Amino acid sequence: MPQTRVALNRMHPLARLDHLYLWHPFTQMRDWLRREPLVMAKGSGAVLGDAQGRKYLDANSSIWTNLHGHNHPAINAALSRQLKKIAHSSALGLANEPASRLAEQLVKAANAPVGQASCLPAGRRPAPPYGRLKTGIRKVFFSDDGSTAIEVALKLAYEFARRTGHSAKPKFLSLRGAYHGDSVGAVALGHIELFHRAYKGLLFKTDQVMAPYCYRCPFNRAAPERADAREYRKCGWECLDKFERKFEAQRKQGNPYAAFVFEPLIQGAAGMIPQPSGWLRQAAQIARGHGALLIADEVMTGFGRTGSPAGASGLPARAASAAAAPSLFACHHEGVQPDFLVLAKGLTGGYLPMAATLTTQAVFDTFLGEYGEFKTFFHGHSFTGNQLGAAAALASLKLLEGAQSIRARSQLEQTLRQELRALWNLPNVGDIRQAGLVAGIELVKDWRTREPFDLREGAGVRVCEAMAKRGVLTRPVGNVIVLMPPYCTTPGQARRMVAALSEGVREMQKALNRRS
Ligand SMILES: Cc1ncc(COP(=O)(O)O)c(C=O)c1O
């Protein structure tokens, strides 16, 4: 047994069980075993309650999954109703009501509002054979989580590229720092050295291209200011030049990219890196111009997370107010209609593991044939189309479309924007970047130099631990603190989250000073 600082017999019995038997994701278990874990037992709205009766604000929506708050009466009721009928039946050979209804709703939501889906520049034609694509999302393939949903998109796009003759050896392009999940296919699309290098031997090769990370962009000539780096950057969109050159180089090799895989508007696990307004629209035009499919990974960004178009990407307020109900998907905020839309996390409002890969009629048709032709998509999961999950997702979608949720999201987005301003007073805050209801606060040694903390110093972890002591729970992405509260978070709760973050940064700095 590893040495533990807390004696097992002094711990809450449930914490003891955890220490004895569990292995936690993305966790150095030696650190974990040094202290008693918080054991979550309850939830209500934005508040989590532990087994000792203490309360915490859920400032990262339980790892980016929860939308409407915990224990929501409408989702609870939908689940109870469904439980009285059936929890699960197989989608292999059988249909079911909630999955079919959910697929219909998702297809409706996944198509950009008319006039917003224009990602081809004037005079530019997509290269055949993808030019024949009937655009628009028509079909839904259900799975279990973000990784499996990405895996489905990858396999479908791969086969589509081969069957249409676009490429004999289809190749994928994704963004630097990308994270698309932990199954082997999803890892192959990822470019986070720390997570992915151990598995290089298992992976197929994909290409990466510069992501628009304005704060640390080598082409940004602006000196640091106390504002989101996207607002004061000085550049000539060199990132897009590089993007275009990548596609050209690949085309010259006679094997154009099959697909470009991206998180629209903001990359999450890469470090909460939001794209400057217009980047996605232009990148999508370039990719399409080279005949590549667009795979939008909205596992984190989907279901209203990136807020209103104006809030998310800096579009003028007029454009934002043109649509009565903002699209639930980030890519639509930049007028991009993808060929694959990958959804998970918030799909069920954060209640159950369920995911969906949405795609076009053209992709679907490529897999049609006589039985003996074996064009079938030979892929599936035991819990595909799970009835409980689909019932929760239908209830969540209904909430999202309601005026109350739309108002609450908009208000929370504004409150966060307002409150986060106070953090610019902290010398260790280098960048504050917000896309709708997601905020990333990048910690640095000194904002004037942008010098990063060495990851081993654990600056982000220290801040989050200090926040937890103040009753606010979130997890860092390296040196970036994430705030991503449930949509039901009140202005007072949002203020408490930011105040705890501010105090946490001060405490982290004091601790590091003491050590040096
Ligand atoms: C953008 C993105 N894609 C895919 C995934 C993988 O999702 P899951 O953890 O549900 O497998 C994640 C998880 O954080 C993600 O952020």
Image (cartoon, helix red, strand yellow):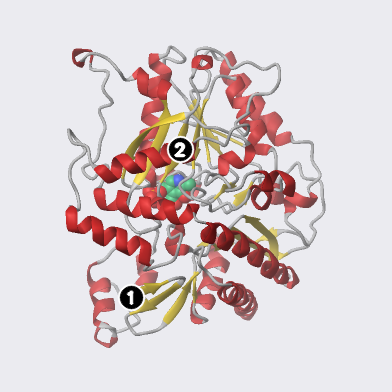
Tell me which label, 2 or 1, sits earlier in the chain.
1
Query: Could you tell whether 419 is left or right of 345 in the image?
Result: right
Q: Is residue 359 above or below residue 88?
A: above
Q: Nearer the viewer, residue 514 or 297?
A: 297
Residue 39: which disc? 1
Q: Is residue 431 at least partly visible in the picture?
A: yes
Q: Quadrant of residue 76?
A: bottom left
At horizontal 57% and vertical 40% (from top left) the residue drawn is 331
Q: Nearer the viewer, residue 460 or 500?
A: 500
Circle 2 packing at 10 Å, graded few (<14), some (14-19), many (20+), is: some
At horizontal 47% and vertical 14% (from top left) the residue drawn is 166
The residue that mark 2 highlights is 108
Q: Is residue 187 at least partly visible in the picture?
A: no
Query: Could you tell whether 299 is left or right of 421 in the image?
Result: left
Task: Answer whether labels 2 and 1 touch (C-beta < 8 Å).
Answer: no
- Give the amino acid at mark 1: Val
Q: Position of residue 82 (x, y in %)?
A: 24, 55
Q: Is residue 311 above or below residue 35?
A: above
Q: Is mark 2 within 8 Å of ligand 1?
A: no
Q: Position of residue 224 (x, y in %)?
A: 79, 57
Q: Nearer the viewer, residue 196 or 412?
A: 412
Q: The N terminus lies in which quarter of the figure?
A: bottom left
Q: Position of residue 237 (x, y in %)?
A: 74, 36
- Give the amino acid at mark 2: Lys
At horizontal 53% and vertical 12% (from top left) the residue drawn is 128
